[in-house]
């Protein structure tokens, strides 16, 4: 049976950009499951599956609807235990919870700073208006004032990744010898930036950038099927 994934897009349906949807996309590929996608714009999200969620990703697997990327990963491991694990046990789930919070508190704020104007540009007229109003209300500043701080914050952002950089000196993936859902969490955040903005967050020689390239190559180069922003 094919699993349906509601995937966040802008004007161009071929460029899904949500970090959380990318987590789900990679988790589904990790499991080797057949999927179809429903390209979904911001203003369409409240209408999917009868208003099941205010955010994406959302999946439908037969009669089962699951919302939230972490809940989707947990569901996939439970529903398809004969396929490669996303967590490797309870310890892996606990580790992934930590990685999720670290990513959202460390990586997401800077990606927002670096890419928010580009993300606005990706939307059609109606969704661009929604994006600007909602984000400026949330951030308390104009989008242009937010992105103006990205150069000043770049060095500190790169330094904040040192725990990940140091760990990757010991092993090729956060999950160890092979990726787990913890890898897809961080990958999703950096893929969000890669697709949204040409602004270079990492030097090519950075161990984190090299790990990200390995993740782009996973599952038949799934991450590379959407070109980087130019």
Image (cartoon, rainbow, N blue to C red):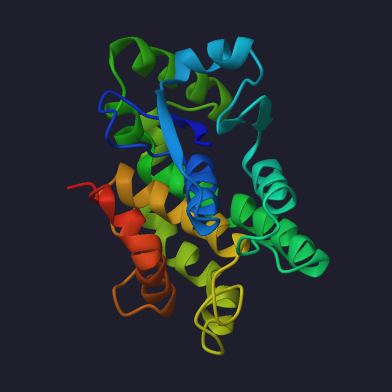
Residue drawn at point x = 44 percent, y = 48 percent:
111
Find residue 85 and report its horizontal and vertical position in percent: 65, 63
Work out whether 70 lies above or below 64: below
The answer to which of 115 and 60 lies nearer the viewer is: 60
- Residue 125 in view in this figure: yes
Find residue 169 and report its horizontal and vertical position in percent: 52, 88
230 sits to left or right of 57: left
Residue drawn at point x = 53 percent, y = 47 percent:
109
Q: Residue furthest bottom?
A: 170
174 sits to left or right of 80: left
The answer to which of 75 and 82 lies nearer the viewer is: 82
Work out whether 165 lies above or below 42: below
Find residue 107 and report its horizontal and vertical position in percent: 53, 55
Work out whether 45 lies above or below 80: above
Q: Residue furthest left?
A: 230
The image quadrant that residue 179 belongs to is bottom right
Find residue 71 and report its horizontal and vertical position in percent: 71, 42
Q: Residue furthest front?
A: 1
């Amino acid at each position: 049976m094919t699993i349906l994934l509601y995937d966040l897009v802008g004007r161009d349906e071929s460029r899904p950009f949500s970090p959380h949807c990318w987590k789900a996309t990679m988790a589904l590929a990790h499991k080797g499951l057949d999927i179809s996608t429903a390209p979904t714009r911001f203003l369409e999200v409240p209408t999917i599956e009868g208003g099941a969620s205010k955010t994406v990703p959302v999946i439908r697997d037969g009669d089962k609807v699951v919302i939230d990327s972490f809940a989707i990963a947990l569901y996939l491991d439970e529903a398809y235990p004969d396929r490669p694990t996303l967590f490797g046990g309870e310890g892996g789930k606990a580790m992934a919870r930590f990685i999720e919070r670290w990513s959202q508190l460390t990586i997401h704020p800077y990606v927002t700073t670096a890419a928010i104007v580009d993300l606005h540009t990706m939307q059609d007229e109606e969704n661009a208006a929604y994006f600007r109003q909602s984000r400026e209300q949330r951030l308390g500043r104009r989008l242009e004032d937010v992105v103006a701080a990205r150069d000043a914050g770049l060095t500190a952002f790169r330094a904040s990744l040192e725990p990940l950089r140091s760990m990757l000196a010991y092993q090729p993936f956060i999950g160890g010898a092979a990726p787990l859902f913890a890898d897809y969490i961080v990958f999703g955040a950096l893929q969000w930036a890669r697709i949204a903005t040409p602004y270079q967050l990492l030097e090519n020689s950075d161990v984190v950038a090299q790990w990200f390239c390995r993740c782009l190559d996973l599952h038949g180069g799934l991450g590379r099927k959407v070109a980087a922003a130019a």
